[in-house]
Amino acid sequence: MTLFSDINACTLCADRFAATVTAHTPRPVVWFKSGARILIAGQAPGARVQISGRPFTDPSGDRLRDWMGIADDVFYDRTRVAILPMAFCFPGYNAAGSDLPPPPICANTWRQPAMDLIGSPPLTLLIGGYAQKWHLGGKVSVTDRVASWEIHAPHVFSLPHPSWRNTGWIKKNPWFEADLLPALRTCVQSALAEPPATE
């Protein structure tokens, strides 16, 4: 079996998901390919993605595509954009109706093999604290990571989650839209324009 079929068949978290408020079954959302020009490292699929089987098919995805300055056809072209969350399945909700964190067993099992297959794209977007910690290490807040975006640019950008819950954060940090997003969009276009790496 290939890595893709192995991940698609994964049921490691079946008991965990059955015990959540949503009581759902695993549905890994696998959306990456070797040689992609941009890697989006996120947290985990949400409830809508659990239904659609396609990443970022929700308002967060609309906002992320706007941040990047690209349309759906580019975003969902796996030869150009790889989407690799810290967990491939929707983790479910807790009793308060909040998103549960991505189960560590998913990243521990699948992330490195997936990263090895994707290779080293010219641009990586780290969305949220879980992805930022895995890729960059250390105990640094999301705000501090994003605020120091120039340290890792132009090849790596740390971003807040594009959830509409973070609208207040964006308003509180006007430099995000004024400085970071224009630089990000330039780097996205540069990465997409680069020819794919040869074998």
Image: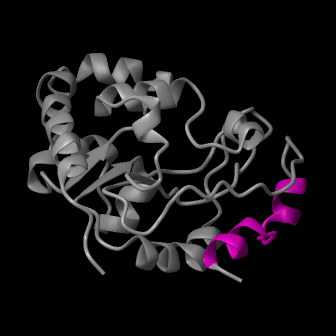
Quadrant where the C terminus is found in the figure: bottom left
Vertical relation: 139 (above or below) 48: below
> What segment carries the magenta color?
3-18
Query: For this view, does 68 lie left or right of residue 147?
Result: right
Please say whether residue 138 is visible from this viewpoint. Answer: no
Residue 47 in magenta stretch: no
In this picture the colour scheme is one colour
Nearer-the-camera pick, 136 or 88: 88
Quadrant where the N terminus is found in the figure: bottom right
Query: For this view, does 100 lie left or right of residue 22?
Result: left
Q: Residue at x 86, y 42 (%)?
A: 21
Q: Residue at x 63, y 58 (%)?
A: 88
Query: For this view, does 146 lie left or right of residue 10?
Result: left
Image quarter for residue 51? Answer: top right
| Dominant secondary structure, magenta | helix
Image quarter for residue 151? Answer: bottom left
